[in-house]
Amino acid sequence: QVQLVESGGGLVQAGGSLRLSCTASGRAFGMYAVGWFRQAPGENREYVGGISRSGGNTDYSESVKGRFTISRDNARYAVDLQMNSMKPEDTAVYYCAARWDLTGRVVYKGQDDYDHWGQGTQVTVSS
């Protein structure tokens, strides 16, 4: 089992940057693939991006590609989401999620692929 906690949310101006962290507790974090999702007010939760267990593969939604970067430090039990060139439409509650993975290479994109979730952190981008 792994427990996840997101941090780093806050208020930022359009064009600015923010870095979110997903910190895990439990065992064997290096065996988990991790994804980031977000949910804007009145909207469904959507996929932002993900990183494989090994960290060697990443994937991003079209809406954030080129602006957001996901990285992980398994020794620190953490996965970071660096968000640059932020837009008001990036405003949402951001969640990290994890799932046990044996391949080491797969990036999972579906919410149903994940069975461990953090509580979320609010990100607000002002125009």
Image (spheres, rainbow, N blue to C red):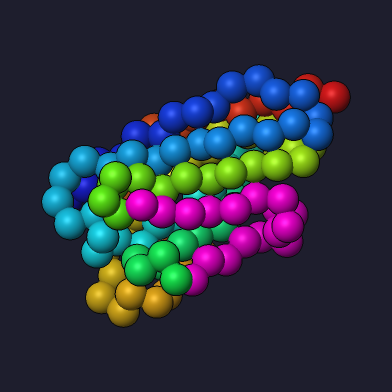
Q: Quadrant of residue 124?
A: top right
Say which residue appears at 21% left-offset and 41% top-offset.
25
**Residue ID at (33%, 75%):** 104
Which residue is nearer to you in this view: 85 or 44? 85
Residue 114, percent from left and from top: 37, 58
Residue 110, visible in the rendered structure: no
Q: Residue at x 48, y 54 (%)?
A: 71
Residue 119: % across, % down: 39, 32
Q: Which residues are magenta?
A: 57-73
Q: Is residue 59 above or below residue 28?
A: below
Can you give x and y, in whole percent of width and height, for residue 116 in the image? 31, 49
For the C terminus, which image quadrant?
top right
113 lies left or right of 20: left
Q: Residue 96 lies in magenta, yes or no? A: no
Q: Nearer the viewer, residue 102 or 116?
A: 102
The percent coordinates of residue 82 (x first, y second) are: 58, 44
Q: Is residue 117 above or below residue 32?
A: above
Q: Is residue 27 left or right of residue 120?
A: left
Q: How many marks?
A: 0
Depicted 68 relative to depicted 16: above or below: below
Residue 69 visible? The answer is yes
Q: Is residue 32 above or below residue 124?
A: below
Side (left or right) of 71 relative to 33: right
Rendered residue at 29%/70% (across/down)? 101
For the view shown, which residue lies furthest in the right direction? 127
| Direction from residue 65 to residue 59 in the image, left or right | left
